[in-house]
Every structure is written in C-alpha cells, then in structure tokens.
Amino acid sequence: MTYLEQDYQPSLLQLARQGNYQAIAYWMNTLLLPQGITIQTKTSRSGHLDILVNFHRITNPKRGLGLQKRLVRMICYRLWTLNSAAIRDVRISARMAGNPQVLWKQTVRIKTPANSVDRPRAHSAAPKNSGQFQVLRSFLVSRLAFAGFVLCYWLIYLETMGHKVGQASLSTPTAQQTIDPSLIPQGTAESTPSSRPSQASGLTFTAPKSFRGQVVYDIQPANEAKVVALTFDDGPWENTTEQILDILRQENIKATFFFVGQAIQANPDVAKKVAAEGHTLGNHTWRHYMDNMDEATAIAEIGNAAKLLYETTGARTALFRPPGGNLGGRLVDFAKELGYTVMLWSADSSDYMVSTPLIIDNVLRNTRPGGIILLHDGGGDRRDTVAALPQIIASLKQQGYRFVTVPDLLRMHAPKPDSTSDGHNPTSPQLPTIRLYRENPGSVD
C-alpha cells in the first residue's frame, strides 16, 4: 500500500487545533520568523499553554518591552482563530534570545465557542458556617495557585536555560573547555571507513576548501545530475537508528548522520555500528540546545560532542549542523571560525511533528537535484520516519535520483582539489592552535 492509499492524516492547523504544542509553535513561527521573532511552547501539568517569545534582532530591552501589548494581542488573535477546546489559559513570557532574563510576562485567557462551554455544577443546600468555609477555601486555593505558578515558571526558566527537568543529566559540558584542533580534520571531501571503528580507525569526514566556514543548504551539481543526500539528526537512538540502518543497507545507500553528544553517550554501540557500515558522521552539539548561546557555551557544546564522537567511533568530522537550524548566537559563528562546514537542508520532512504520509509528501515536494533532505533518527518516537523512508527512497529512485553522502555531494559542486588550490597537506590535517575562549566565559554577547 502506498502512502496515497492510507487514511487521511491531520494537517498542521488541525494538529494545532487539537492542542499539539509543537504544531502550535511551528505554525506561529512561520508567522513571526520574518520579523526576527521565534517562540517556544510547552504545556504545563495544570493544562496551561506556556509560550516563550525570543527576540533575535532586538538589542535594546526597552524596545522589547514596548512590543508587549502588540505581540500579546497578535498571539491571542492567532490562538483565537484556532477555535480550540484544548487552548484556554495561556502564559506568555518574552526575552532577548540568548539572555535568560525575562523582559515581561502576561497571563491571558482565550475564550472561543469551542472552550466556553462550562461543565454543569451540582447544586446543594448551603451547609452551616459556609461563609467561613468559603473564606478558608479561597485562602488555601490562592496560596496553592501562587505556589503552582512559581513552580511552573521555574520549570520554564530551567528549560530555557537548557536543563532537562525530571531527567538525570548524562553529562554537563564544562564552560571553559578548549577544543583539540586535531579532532577537526581539513582536506578534501574524502572519508576512510573502517570495518571496526576505534580511535585508530582513521575516519575523517571533511569538505572542500571552498565550503569550509560556509553555511550550505544545497548545491548545484554539475550537469544537473540528479543526486540527493539523506541526512538524519539527533541520534544515535535505540531501535530507530538500527531500523534505518537496515533499510539503507537493503537499498545500498550511504547517508549522513548528525550525532548529539548525549545520545552517543547513551547509545555508544549504535554509534559504532553507524560508522562501521560506512555512513558519514557529523557534529550536532552535545545536548541539542536550540537557543542562542555565548562563546563559552558554544565551545563546550561543539567540543564535548567532537571529543566523544572521536573516542567512540574514531571519527573526526568537519561537518556541523546547528540544532533547529538556528544561525543566531555564537554557536554557528564559532563553528565557522573552526573551519566546520555548517550543513542545513533544502527539504524539511517535519518528521518530528507529522505522520508518515505528510513526511513523504514534504520530502517529495521539496527534493531537487543537489538537495539535502532532513530526517530524524533520534530525539523521540521516530516510527513514522522509519515507515516513510522506504517509500521516499523508492519514489526518488523512480524519478532517477541517486543517493550520496554530504561530502560526496559537496565534492560534485566544488572544483577538483589539488595541493595548491585546496591547501591540503595529507600528513598534517590539523587546524592551527588558537585561543578559543574569553577571559570571562560566563558573559553573554
């Protein structure tokens, strides 16, 4: 059965109307991103929808304060148009991206026909001393409500600072860590796979000189060759990554996996298996923190991930993908300074929030020669991705596409490297030693 014959699947707006907070964030960001504003959403235990507004272009706090009234009105209107029974009480807070200090916060109630129907209440005769009881109950409820608000606000604050609430931290990157330059190879787009990865395996994944320090969404292949790169983020992941490996092996396809440091730490054997099967590896930071960050945090995020990737698989990579494709803050700038090629994508499957048929449709509609396809093997339940992958591959093969890794794709666009034009010295693939942190690593740009 093809995906066109499967049952109808909900649209993005339908998911948002059902109260799916990820769909709400995705929908709202499509409206706000052109203005340099992004939002993050979550639902609290009390059923409130928490919205965190991030200003990316504003440097003056007074300007952010001045936008409160207009922005709250806009968010309320957009949520009202959903007419959702699942959305009623909303807490909105705002800050400048990368700065933990909250500029303002406001609690609103969205009243729509769908959520305005109150449950009937049973009436009974008022007991004696009911007035005193009501006063006592109001006192207790007010105190509990205040305590709950403080707790929920603190949880939101911890989340925006990158802490995982309710989970044991696998490892916390050290703020002043420096990066060993030998972990970041330079040279042409070549890789040397090994059947048994180890620290001595010599795996290197690099890009041509013309792409170093650049942000790449896709390439223009020579002669409009129908080539495309499959990329997978947020792994290695238990079960899912190995299922994807099985599919790729059956189809004789090599892909590119951007690993998260904490996921490598949790699933080292899976990481080794990906490397052993000849796939390309990239750096996706240590903890997948999607917000802007200062230089000290960027050093820790990239450095810890690069170190563990090498210790686990023996691979050195100069391919980097920022979490969420966020190009703000110091993370991407620092990666470019190190010589990483920052890899984004041209076809977003949105598999982190939609079902199998929509994943397939998103990929097929946006794939073009020289394109880079974004999928996820980790970060959550990826059963829909696994189900969609065989049909994506079959459909693109029918259209004449050939699948290559990211380094191979970049090499098809770049001029042929040589010792003079590329500056590659095979015997010394190291960056020069440079200072990578400031005197005050805790300050914010």
Image (spheres, rainbow, N blue to C red):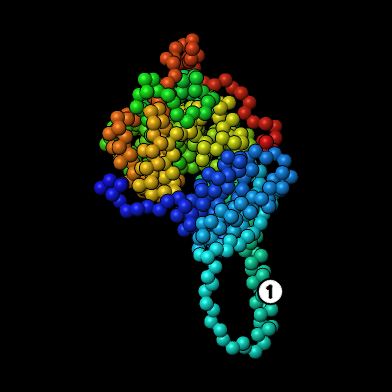
Measuring from the top left, give residue 409's x and y in whole percent: 40, 25
Which residue is at a point 67% across and 54% down the rendered structure image?
A: 105
Tell which of 10 and 141 is nearer to you.
10
Q: Quadrant of residue 259?
A: top left
Measuring from the top left, give residue 187's x and y in whole percent: 46, 19
Which residue is at a point 46% across and 34% down the rendered structure image?
A: 345
Q: Is residue 346 visible?
A: yes
Measuring from the top left, give residue 361's x and y in whole percent: 37, 42
Q: Quadrant of residue 199?
A: top left
In the picture shown, does residue 309 fall above or below 158?
above
Q: Amino acid at mark 1?
A: Phe
Which residue is at a point 65% across and 77% down the rendered structure image?
A: 137
In the picture shown, does residue 156 fall above or below 368?
below
Secondary structure of the residue carrying tag 1 is: helix
Measuring from the top left, give residue 91's x and y in whole percent: 61, 57
Tell which of 203 and 160 is nearer to you.
160
Tell which of 254 and 192 is nearer to you.
254
Q: Quadrant of residue 332?
A: top right
Q: Is residue 201 visible?
A: no
Q: Work out which quarter of the rendered image holds the C terminus and state it.
A: top right
Which residue is at a point 35% across and 24% down the rendered structure image?
A: 225
- Residue reaching furthest left? 1
Which residue was labeled with disc 1? 139
Tell which of 227 and 191 is nearer to you.
227
